[in-house]
Image (cartoon, helix red, strand yellow):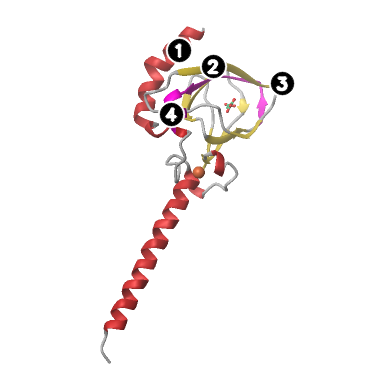
Amino acid sequence: MDSMLEKLMEDFIRHISEIFFADVGGYALDSHHGFVIQYGFNRDIELGLHVDDSEVTLNVCLGKQFSGGELYFRGVRCDKHMSAEALPEEIFEYSHIPGHAIIHRGRHRRGARATTAAQRINLLLWCRSSVFRELSKHPKDFVRWCGECQREMRERVNQAVTAKKRYRFLFIFSSIPF
Ligand SMILES: O=C(O)CCC(=O)C(=O)O
Ligand SMILES: [Fe+2]
C-alpha cells in the first residue's frame, strides 16, 4: 500500500504540483503520509477548520453515496496568519462525489461539514517537500503563497503609490510661480 501511494505521488501528483503548486515545492515532493478517514454513523461526524502538515494534499472520495460532508475552504495561510479573516473570494465549498478526487495546498484552511446520512470514506495523501521546508526556515519579508501576506503586500504597494502621487502633486504645486 505504501509503495503504491509513493508511486501515486511520484508519477502523478508531482506533475500536477509542478504546474499548479510551484510556490510550495512543485515537483520536489519527496515524502508522503497516507490514511483513510470515515465519517457518519458511529464515527466522527464533522471536522473543524484546520491545515495539514503537507505541502500538497490529495483527497479521494471512496465508498458509496452519502449526504453532507461538504468541505468549506477559507484561504491559504502561513503560520503567522493562521487566524486572519478570509477574504470573500477565498470562501467556497466543495461537495465530495464518490470516485472523484481533489488536490489542494496543505496550508489551505478548511473543514468538513457533518455527514448526515450513510458513511463517507476518503483517502488522504499528504505530500511533503524537504527542499521547500528547508528553504522556508530562512526568514522572508512575506510568504508568496499566503493569501494574507499577499493582501498586506498589495496594501504596502498601494500606500507607496499614493505617497508618491501626493509628493509629485506637492512638487508641481510648489513650482508654480506666484
Ligand atoms: O473530510 C475531508 O474530506 C477532509 C479531511 C481532511 O481535511 C483531513 O483529514 O485533514
Ligand atoms: Fe502570511
In this rendered view, identify the residue nearer to me: 85 or 163.
163
Residue in front for this viewpoint, 72 or 174:
174
- Asked which quadrant contains residue 158, the reply is bottom left
- Kind of residue sitting beneath label 3: Phe
Cα distance between the residues tagged 1 and 4: 18 Å
Ranked by sequence position, the earlier of labels 2 and 3 is: 2
Q: CA distance from mark 1 to mark 2?
A: 9 Å
Residue corresponding to mark 2: 34
Label 2–label 3 contact, CB within 8 A: no
Question: On the rendered image, what quadrant is the C terminus found in?
Answer: bottom left
Q: Nearer the viewer, residue 36 or 64?
A: 36
Q: Is mark 2 within 8 Å of ligand 1?
A: no
SS category of the residue bearing label 3: loop
Q: Which residue is mark 4?
A: 132
State the separation of the CA atoms marked 2 and 3. Answer: 23 Å
Q: In this rendering, is residue 111 above or below 178?
A: above
The residue to which callout 1 is attached is 6
Report the residue at 74% width, 19% height from top. 42
Residue 146 is left or right of residue 168, and the answer is right
What segment carries the magenta color?
Answer: 114-135
Is residue 148 among the parts visible in the rendering?
yes
Q: Are marks 3 and 4 in contact (CB under 8 Å)?
A: no
Numbered mark located on residue 159 in the image: none
Q: Give the CA separation, mark 2 to mark 4.
A: 20 Å
Dot 2 or dot 4, earlier in sequence: 2
Task: Report the mark closest to the observer, 2 or 4.
Answer: 4
- The amino acid type of the residue labelled 4 equals Phe
Which of labels 3 and 4 is toward the front?
A: 4
Task: Report the disc number at residue 41.
Answer: 3
Residue lying farthest to the bottom in this orientation: 178
